[in-house]
Amino acid sequence: MIRIDREIVVARPPDAVFDYLADVERFPQWQPAIERAEQLTPGPLAAGTRLRLVVRGPTGPTEVLGEVVTVDRPALLAVRTLDGPAVVEARCTLAADGDGTRVAFDATIELKGLLRFAEGAARGMIERELPGALADLARRIESEA
């Protein structure tokens, strides 16, 4: 199982950071493995909202059904996959930090089937890409000030 536990500080208030993170169509801008994201359930984002995600995989793009687990604006957003090549559970926890927001990202990724044998390579790719992706995320949110 791959575990992710990272934090960044964004120079924007928690409401602004949360709203950016909770905008499903923006998921590909800050999650390197997601190529496209679409909210399937109409209405505001809430627990139980279904998502269609197209994720980058070793055999090419794969469509995955996801679900929002928790929405607690501006403190917590949690999602999980319901199908696809991996079981993913991810949380973004936000807290005020001076004039900005501390965002903790934690996730578990359990690859299924033969992909389990690629866990080391997947972990290495995540460790290489994630720091830059999170720094870019902070810059994107801050530029909307």
Image (cartoon, rainbow, N blue to C red):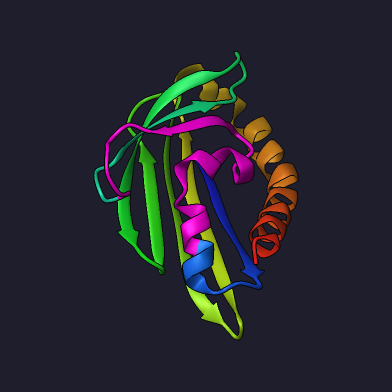
Task: Establish if 79 lies above or below 98.
Answer: above
Report the residue at 39% width, 63% height from top. Answer: 76
Most distant residue in the front direction: 145
Q: Position of residue 109 (x, y in %)?
A: 48, 40
Q: In the rendered structure, does residue 28 fall within the stretch colored magenta?
A: yes
Depth order, front residue of 84/61: 61
54 vs 135, left or right, is left
Task: Say if residue 106 shows up in the picture.
Answer: no
Magenta residues, as a range?
Answer: 18-45
**What x and y, as percent, mark residue 38?**
43, 32
Identify which residue, 80 or 23, lies in the foreground.
23
Residue 91: say if magenta: no
| Figure check: 144 above or below 23 | below
Identified at 40% across, 57% down, the residue is 77
Front residue of 140/1: it is: 140
In the picture provided, is 96 more to the left or to the right than 32? left
